[in-house]
């Protein structure tokens, strides 16, 4: 799964990599994004591939009564998006979630009381895009319209199976040369086999 992502590059590097302009450059922030806080982070949607927008993490289906649903949709299993009511209406709403790293915790004991933190990046920590889906939701109580996203996940490769050693899942990272094709027609070529891992110096106790 993927609940913590990192973005450390300057805005200009993102714009150059994706050949896209930031819609609200004054709102751009770097740092670690915690999915459970449903932050806004940079995303490119298929309808506007030349614009980097800010969307909230945690997809809210158009039919949801309130935003509590988003805690269940930080990630979406790629194998079942056509079956799940949360995602089947937006399977063609493809997007790229901009990042240059993500974090995962390896269980060091059977109950997960001791964990080892890993940061996963591409070589040289280059910018990349997670494959995702996006949705537009209208808050019935306020009339506000929100754009939200989920990150697609797939079966862990050999590296990630050792790190994410409980559910053995990993986020889908799009091969940089294929990013436009993913947005345009859904052609997906993964860059997951290029991932490298570095460890935090400390074992973490009792959760994240």
Image: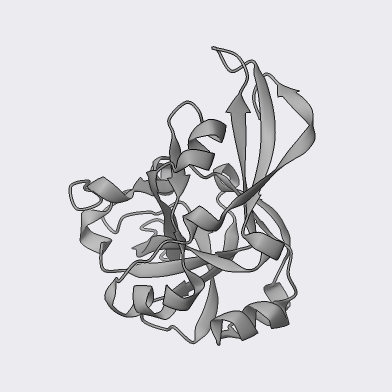
Could you say which is closer to the camera, residue 127 or residue 58?
A: 127
**Which picture quadrant has residue 199?**
top right
Q: Which residue appears at 32% of the width and 80% of the height?
A: 184
Residue 93 image offset from top left, x and y in percent: 31, 69
Question: Farthest residue in the top direction?
Answer: 110
Q: Quadrant of the C terminus?
A: top right
Q: Position of residue 204 (x, y in %)?
A: 73, 25
* Residue 85 drawn above or below residue 183: above
x and y percentages locating residue 83 in the rendered image: 18, 47
Which residue is at a point 57% across and 34% down the rendered structure image?
Answer: 163
Q: How is the image coloured?
A: one colour
Count of picture labels: 0
Image-based side of 20 in relation to 72, left or right: right
Q: Is residue 12 left or right of residue 63?
A: right
- Residue 103 percent coordinates (x, y): 63, 44
Q: Residue furthest right?
A: 201
On screen, 80 above or below 99? above
205 relative to 17 in the view: left or right: right
Does residue 170 lie above or below 206 as drawn?
Answer: below
> Which corner quadrant of the image does residue 186 belong to?
bottom left
Q: Residue at x 64, y 77 (%)?
A: 14
């Amino acid at each position: 799964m993927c609940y913590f992502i990192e973005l450390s590059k300057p805005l200009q590097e993102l714009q150059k990599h994706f050949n896209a302009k930031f819609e609200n450059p004054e709102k751009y922030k770097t740092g670690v994004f915690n999915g459970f806080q449903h932050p806004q982070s940079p995303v490119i949607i298929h309808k506007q591939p030349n614009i980097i927008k800010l969307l909230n993490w945690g997809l809210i289906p158009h039919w949801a009564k309130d935003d509590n649903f988003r805690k269940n949709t930080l990630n979406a299993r790629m194998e079942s998006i056509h079956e799940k009511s949360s995602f089947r209406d937006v399977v063609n709403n493809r997007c790229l979630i901009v990042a240059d790293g993500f974090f995962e915790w390896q269980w060091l004991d059977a109950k997960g009381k001791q964990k080892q933190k890993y940061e996963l990046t591409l070589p040289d920590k280059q910018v990349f895009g997670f494959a995702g889906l996006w949705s537009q939701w209208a808050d019935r109580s306020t009339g506000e319209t929100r754009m939200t996203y989920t990150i697609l996940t797939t079966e862990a490769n050999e590296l990630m199976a050792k790190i994410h050693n409980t559910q053995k899942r990993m986020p889908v990272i799009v091969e940089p040369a294929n990013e436009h094709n993913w947005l345009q027609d859904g052609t997906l070529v993964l860059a997951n086999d290029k991932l490298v891992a570095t460890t935090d110096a400390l074992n973490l106790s009792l959760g994240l």
